[in-house]
Structure formats: C-alpha cells, structure tokens
Amino acid sequence: MTVKNILFPLLASNKGGNILSAASICNNINKKKYKIHILLIFNKREEKKNLLLLKNSNSYAINYLKSKYKKNSLYSKIILFFQLICFFFSKKFDIVHTNDGSLNFFFSLLNLIFKFNLIIHLRNTDNSRRNYIPFAISKKIICISNFVKNINSNIFNNKKVVLYNYVDFFYKNVKLREKHKILLNKNKKKKIILYVSNIHERKKPINFLKIIKELTKIDKNYLGLMFFQSNKIEYAKIKNYIKKYNISKNIYLFYNLPAHYWIPLIKKVNKIILLATSINEPLGRNLIEAIFNNIFVIANNSGGHKEIINNKFGILTDTNKIKKISITIHKVFKNKKYFIKNKDLSSIKKKFQNKNYFKKIENIYSNI
C-alpha cells in the first residue's frame, strides 16, 4: 500500500480554530495510509513554544521554519516564498492541506513548481478576487460552514464541500494558575458573562464592554471574563476602553493563555453565559465549545452562528443593540434559562463530533 505524504502548513502567530482543526485531523486520520508532516512557520520563539498541542503526538513530523513574515509587508512575503521553495527542494509531498487563508496564495504558486495536490480548508469570509488563483489551482475547497460556501464565488462550487469542524478539546494538560483559581472563588456567586475570541474589529469586543457597562447599571453582580490572544497594542486599547467605561471592577482579562484555558477555569461556575458579539463569523467554534460544556449562548444573529444555535442552546439576536441585548441577558439570568440539558446535546455532537468527519477527509485525499 502506497503511503501518501500530507503537509499541513501553519502560521504560529495564528492561535485560532485553524490550528485546532489541523491538530484534530493530524491526530485522527489513518497513519497507515497517510504520513503527516506539519510545517510551523514562526517569527518569535514564544510563538513556537506556545503551540504545545501540536507536540502531543509522535505520529507526525513537525518542521520549523523561522520567518519574519508580516501580512502587510511585501518584502517579508517575498522572503517567505523563497524560504518555502528551499524547504520544498528538500522534501516531497503528495498533498498540501492549508488551514490558513494567509498561506493559500503561497502554496498555489508553489504548486506550479512542485506539482503536489492542493487542498484549501476555507475558514474565512474573504470573497475578494485575489483568492481566485488559489481556488482555481486547488483540487478541493473544504468549507467549514454553508455560510462560508455561499459567501465565496459560485464559480468554484464544483470544488467546494461543506464539512463542519470536528470540535476537539485540548485542555487535559492545562495547568491553572493559582491566582486565577483564587480570583474565581472570590467571584463564583456573580453572574458571569464570557467572551472567548480574538479582539480584532470583526469580533466586536467593544460591544462586549458596552454591554457589560449597561448590565452593571441593572445589577452590580455582573462580571465579564475575556479570554483572547493579542499583541501589546491591542491589549492596551482594550484596557483603555475599560478605563473609559469605568468597568475595571467588572471585567477581568485573560490573554495569551493556552488553548481552552477558560474551560477548566469556569467549570465550577453556575451562573454563566457566553456572549458572542462577532459579526459574520465563518462558524463560531467558541459557541460549540461552550454548548458542549453546558454554557448557554447569546450570539449575534449573523454568519455561521445561525448554523449552531437553536432555542435549546441559546438565543440569536442583534448584539449591536446594546440596551436591548443587556435586557435580554438579564432576563435569561432572572428566569434561569442559562441551563443546557445533557439530553439535548446529542444533535450538536452528531454535527460537530462525528468520527465520520475524518473518514470524509481521507476520502478527499484518496480521490484527488
């Protein structure tokens, strides 16, 4: 039996769902048929160290490529491209499976030189024409939701397939900091509003802060916990907004912590909901993770959120309407609607934890 070599290129600077999704695939597909290689492109040593979840298996090879790649720097892109050419001269791959939209163009050009099969795992809503070249060169385009499939050009519909992410959890080896345990014990009787996302503009973190501000006018016992990855500039902006809204006593920031650090931290909290303020989210992995952990969700009524939430798990609403959403949240707590019954989880597990997902990935590999 011929074993196919599969390469997963990943940017270490991106700590989002693409890394988690790639790790799930690498850990679960048939190792007798497919030999997995990961190419981790990193800039700083910290980025390399932070992705411990990729080191949890000996069943694949991890290659490290240090590059000063910046999305807005043409010079750094040219340098990275030539670094990748050098890497490919020493390796041979049957399939390259990209999980980051920033890398699709690089590997579509490399495909013209090294003639591998390109699979694009599409998890963004960038429908600009610059994507047409990678889409045209790719053999298959895996879309993480119907929203992602429909927002991108119909020209490539024959290559598209919708496969919802298999949602794994990577928190078994997470060690909680003692100060965080103490912090939560002090506040365990408060009404917790959870934010788990990045803090760029599309995620609408400022709306979250405004909603917390509005809730404190209703009840001082509301507390916002924000879990996110950020650089120092973004972090400083959030802190400035917190100071501006005078809610420093009602917001705690947890930033640049390991994936899923928030899950064991909030396990003992009873009064808690997840508030997802982002607009046109490709899917919304954080919503699925919250539901699996019996956390009621209130989410912006847009994008992939609509493919996750029903009335058993949460509420879809317009999170731009700050006063209205604040009243909705208060009613949820007042009426104790923030409990999710275990018996209702079967449908979402079938959708987002179906082992057939990996068989479908393998079928794509074998049929190209």
Image (cartoon, helix red, strand yellow):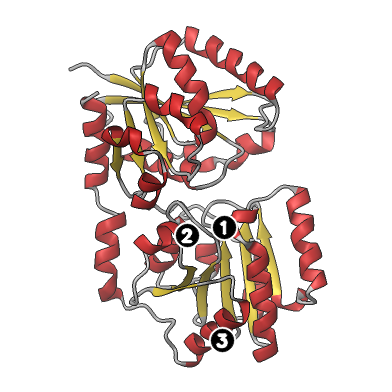
Is residue 219 visible to us here? no
Badge 2 density bin: few <14, some 14–19, many ≥20, Cα 10 Å = some
Residues tagged 1 and 2 counted as in contact (Cβ below 8 A):
yes
The image shows residue 258 at horizontal and vertical percentages of 58, 51
Residue at image position (49%, 32%) is: 129
Callout 1 touching callout 3 (CB < 8 Å): no
Residue 143 locus on image (x, y percent): 36, 43
Are circles 3 and 2 on residues that touch, CB within 8 Å? Answer: no
Which residue is painted at 27% across and 41% down in the image?
A: 358
How crowded is the residue under tag 3: few (<14 C-alpha within 10 Å), some, or many (20+)? some
At label 1, the amino acid type is: Ser
What residue is disc 1 on?
A: 197
- Numbered disc 2: secondary structure: helix
The residue lying at 41 percent from left, 41 percent from top is 152
User: Which image quadrant is residue 97 in?
Assistant: top left
Of marks 3 and 2, which one's residue comes earlier in the chain? 2
Q: In the image, what residue occupies the spot 71% across and 77% down?
A: 250
Determine which residue is flagged by label 3.
327
> How much space separates mark 1 and mark 2, taking CA atoms?
7 Å
